Image (cartoon, rainbow, N blue to C red):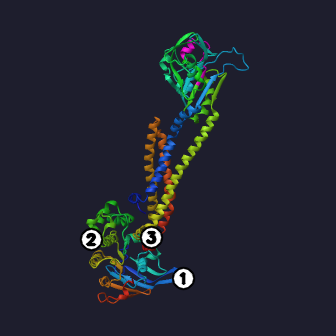
Amino acid sequence: MTKLFDILRVSSRQVLRQRRRYFGVILSIALGTAGLIAVSTMSRDVKKNLNQDLELLGGCTLVKAYFEEFLPDRHQSSRIQRFDPKTVEAVRNSPGVALVSLSGVKRGAASSVWRNRTESFTLFGVDEYFWEVNSFYAASGELFGKPDVQDRQRVCVLGAELAHRIFGENNAVGSVISIDHDIYRVTGILGGLGVGDRTQFAFIPLTSGLDRITGMSSDRLYIRCASWDDVERVAESVSALVSAHQSADRLRIVFAGEQLRRVKRIVWWVEWFIYLSVVATLILGGFGIWNGMMSAVQARTREIGLKKAMGAEDGDILAQFLTEALCLSLGSAAIGIGFGRTIMEVIGKLLSSPPREDLFIRFMIAGLLFALALGIGAGFYPALRASRMEVVKAIRYE
Amino acid sequence: MNNPSTESSGNTPLIEVREVTHAYHNGAGIIPVLRGVSLSVGHEEMAAVMGPSGCGKSTLLSILGLLLIPSQGSYRALGRDLLSLSRSQQAEFRRKFIGFVFQSCNLIENTTVYENLEFPLIYAGVRRSERTPRIRETLARVNLLHRLHHPSNLLSGGEQQRVAVARALVNRPRIILADEPTGQLDREHSQLVMDHFEQLVEEENIAVILVTHDPQVASRCHRVYILEDGVLSVAPKPGTLPPDSSMRCSP
C-alpha cells in the first residue's frame, strides 16, 4: 500500500492543481463552515445585543423583585421590608445576571410647590445603575450618576410630563424644585422607549431619599439578565437568594413571561432557518464533492488504468480518491474556519464583545468533523468505483 | 514476493505462455480472440508481435502484463505460475517486474515529468531519498533530464513517448511490454526509442515484448510473432520481413 505521506502529498497536489474545477465546492463548504462557526459562536452575543434592542420594546430580560407594601391578609401597619446589601450583592453575582439596580419608592405621593401651585407625583430613589438597567437616557440635561449617589446629592431627574406640569414651557434642567420641603436641582429629563408612566415620576438618588424622604425604603430590585435564556432561571433563583440572607416575606417577582415566550419563539425560528441554511450549504458542498469526484473518476479513467498497470492496488486507488475528497472537504473547511474567525472578529467589534475562544474551538472542531464526515460520505462511492475499475477497459477509455 | 532471479537462471525462458485462449462476451455471444497461443521469450531478448487490427495483439499484451486473465492456458514468468497469483500479488508482480509503454495518452495529466516517473516508485515503496537520483538517472538515459520538472502535457509527442519509456524503466523491471510504442512517432524518434530498447536488453538483462505494425521496428527484434485469427505463429527471420500491407492498421 502507498505510504500515507505520499497519498496526502499526491492528493493535495491534485486538488490544488484542479482548484478552479472545484471552486464551487470549495466555496460552498467554506461558506457553510464559516456560517456554522459565526452563528454558533456569536449567537449569544447577537442575542444579548438583540435583547437590549428588544428591551426598548418590551423589557423581556428585566426581572423586577420587590416587597409588597400591603398584603390583603395582614395589617396595613406592618413593617416595610427592604433589600439587605448582602442580598443585593448575592443577586449581582448570580449566574445569568448582567446588572442589578436597587431602588425604592416613597409610600404615598411626594409633592412639589412651584409658584404657589402644588404638584403631587410618585418619587423614586434610585442608584446609579437604574438608568442602564432600564435602558433610560436623558431626553435633555443629564441623568445623575455614581458621585451624586455616593455624595447623597440633592439632585433629581424628572419625567417629561411632570416637568411640563411643573415648569410649563420653561426649561426645567438646571432649575431647582422643592420635593417634600427639600430643595433639589433638576439635572435632566428622563427619556427612553420604555419610560411608560414614569414620565410622571421624579427620581432622586436612593441615598438622598433614604436620608430625607419619609416612607422611602430600598424595597425593589431591577435585574437585567444576560439573555432571555437566563430570565426564567434568574427569576426562580431570586427568592432563594433573598431567603438565604433575609426574610423573603412579601417578596414578589415580576417578569414579562408572555413577551419573553413570543420573542423566544421568533428567535427560535430565525435560528432554525439560519442553521438550516448552514446545513443546506454544507450538504450542497457534499453533493459538489460527490459530483466532482464522480466526474473526476470518469475523466481520469485512463489515469486509473495507467496507475494500476504501474502496480497500484485497488486500495491505493481507493485511498487516493478518498484522500482527494477529504483534502477538498477539510481544506475547504479550513478556509471556512478562517472566514468564520474573520466574521466573528467583525461581529465582536460591532457588538463591542470579544468572541469566546472556547466556543470558537468547540465549533471549529465540529466544523472539521462535519467536513470529515462529508468528505468520507461524498467521496467513498466515487473512490470505490475508481478502485474497482477494470484495468484494460480503463486504459482503452477515450 | 521472493526474488525470482535464481529461479530464472539457466536456459529457462523468462516468459513462457502455453495454449492460452481468450474470448470476449458480448450481447451476441462469445467472440474468441486468442486460440491456443504459445510463446516464450528469453532473457536479453526483444520480441515483436505483429498482426492486423483487432487480431488480439493488445489482448495478448494485457495477458502478459497480468491486466487480463485468460480463459484458459498457462503463463509462467521468472519461474512462477502467474495465473495462480491473487489480484494483489499480481499487482505486486507488475510493480516489481513489469514496465508498460502504451501507444498514446501515456502520461498522467496535470503532472510534471518528475511526478510521472515518481508514481511507480511510490507504489513500489521506494524511499523518497532514493527516488530523485533514480528518476534523474532514468531520464538521462532517454535524453530528457532537462525536462525534469516540465509539465508533461507541454512536451512534444516524441518527448512524451520517451517519458513513457523512462517511466516503464524507472522501477528497473525485468520485462517491458510496449503496445505500439512508436505508433505516433516520426522515423527519427522511432529509431531513438528502439535504440533505447536494444540498449536495455543488452545492458539490463531484460526482455522486451512489443506490439507493432511497423516492419522496420519488428526487424530490429530478435524474434517476430504474427498473430492472425487468434493464432500466433513465428514469422520469417527478422530483417527479411516484407513491408506487408496486411499487417498495417486499417484506416
Magenta stretch in the rendered image: A206-221
Q: Is residue B150 above or below residue B216?
A: above
Report which residue position mark 2 lands on: B141
Task: Please state if A316 lies on the left or on the right of B45 as rendered.
Answer: right
Report which residue position mark 1 lands on: B28
**Residue A3, percent across and down?**
40, 60
Q: Which mark is residue B89?
A: 3
Task: Tell me whether marks 1 and 3 sit on the same chain.
Answer: yes
Which quadrant would the C terminus of chain B be assigned to in this image? Answer: bottom left
Whichever of callouts 1 and 3 sits on the residue coming sooner in the sequence is 1
Q: Nearer the viewer, mark 2 or mark 1?
A: 1
Q: CA distance from mark 2 to mark 1?
A: 48 Å
- Frontmost residue, A119 versus A18: A119
**Residue A267, percent across and down?**
58, 41
Task: Tell me whether marks 2 and 3 sit on the same chain.
Answer: yes
Q: CA distance from mark 1 to mark 3?
A: 34 Å
**Residue A100, percent across and down?**
55, 26
- Frontmost residue, B40 versus B59: B59
Q: Is residue A267 above or below residue B89?
A: above
Which element is circle 1 on? Answer: loop
**Residue B36 can be seen, yes or no:** yes
Whichever of callouts 2 and 1 sits on the residue coming sooner in the sequence is 1
**Residue A202 can be seen, yes or no:** no
Q: Nearer the viewer, mark 2 or mark 3?
A: 2
The chain letter for the residue carrying disc 2 is B
Q: Name the amino acid type tagged 1.
A: Ala
Q: Nearer the viewer, mark 1 or mark 3?
A: 1
